[in-house]
Amino acid sequence: MTLLVTVNEAEEDQTGAPDMKAVIAVVGLAIEARIAGTAAMIADGDRTAFLLRDAIRQGARGVISFGVCGGLDPKLRPGKVVIASSVFAGKGEAYPSDLLWAEELLRMIPGSGYSPIAGVASPITSFEQRQDFHATTGAVAADMESQIVARIAAEFRIPFAACRVVLNPAHRILPRAALINIGPAGKPGLRKIGGSVLKDPRQLPSLSRLAIDAVIAVLALRSAKQRLGTHLGFPHLRSRRPLNCLIPSAPAAYPM
C-alpha cells in the first residue's frame, strides 16, 4: 500500500510549519519518507500514479522525486547529490525538470550536480548494462520513481524536480539479497534477505560494502533535506497562478 507520511511522523527541521498541499515527495523507501517529511508518498507500482493524481487534484502544487539512486556514470561516488536536469522515462520519452526549482536545489545544496537521470522499472544490475544505458541516454543515475513523477507532473502541468543521492556506484554489483523486492510500506523484507544470505553466504562482503554505502547516502540525503527545508526548495510558493491540475494535458515529453 502506498502511504502518505505527514510531517508529524517525520524528522523535523528548523524551517517552520509545513503547507501540506504545496509539495509531494515521491520516494521508494520508508527511511526516505521519514527524511523527506512534509507529505511523502512511498511508491507502490501502478497504484502510485493513481494516488499521485489524486494528491494533485487535492491541491499539490509541485512534485519531487526524492531519495537514493544507483550510479550510471562511473565518476559518481556514494553520497553525491544529483539534481535532475531531465528524466529519461523510456525510449523516445524524456521530461525536462522545472528550471527554477532545479536552480534553487543547486543553490541550496553545495556540491550537488546537475545532469539527466533515468527512471526505470527494475534495477540495472550489471556494470556493462549501466555503461550502455549511460552512453545511450546520457543519464548519470537511475531510480524507480522519477519516471512516475515526471509523467504525472507533465500530465497535470505542474512543476517537478528530482533530488537523488547516489548509493551504489556504477561499478558496484549488487548481491542477490539486495535485489529482493521491497516489502510493504517501503521496508526491506529482512527475512527474505536473511534467507538469501543463508543460501549463499558469499554475499556477505558485498552486503557489508553496500551497508557502508547506504550509511553515506542516507547521511547525505538527510543533510540535503535539512538545507532544503519543509518545502524541499520549492520556489513557486508565492505564485498565485491558477492551477491546471483538474484538466490533465498531453505529457510534455521531448524526443530522445
Image (cartoon, grey):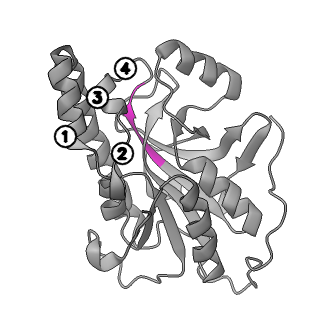
24 displayed left or right of 157: left
| Residue 100 or residue 215, whichever sits in front | 215
The quadrant the C terminus occupies is top right
Under circle 4, the secondary element is loop
Sequence-wise, the earlier of marks 4 and 2 is: 4
Q: Nearer the viewer, mark 1 or mark 4?
A: 1
Under circle 1, the secondary element is helix
Residue count near mark 2 (Cα–Cα under 10 Å), binned few <14, some 14–19, many ≥20: some
249 displayed left or right of 151: right
| Residue 104 seen by the camera | no
| Disc 4 target residue | 172
Task: Please identify the dominant SS of the magenta region.
Answer: strand
The label shown at residue 191 is: 1
Report, in whole angstroms, how far the alpha carbon at label 2 lies from the one at label 3: 11 Å
Q: Is residue 113 a member of the stretch shown in magenta? A: no
| Cβ atoms at labels 1 and 4 below 8 Å apart | no
| Disc 2 target residue | 182
| Disc 3 target residue | 177
The amino acid beneath tag 4 is Arg
- Give the residues drawn in magenta, as a range: 164-169
Sequence-wise, the earlier of marks 1 and 3 is: 3
* Quarter assignment of residue 240: bottom right
Q: Which residue is drawn at 40% across and 74% down?
A: 38
Q: Which residue is drawn at 47% across and 82% down?
A: 20
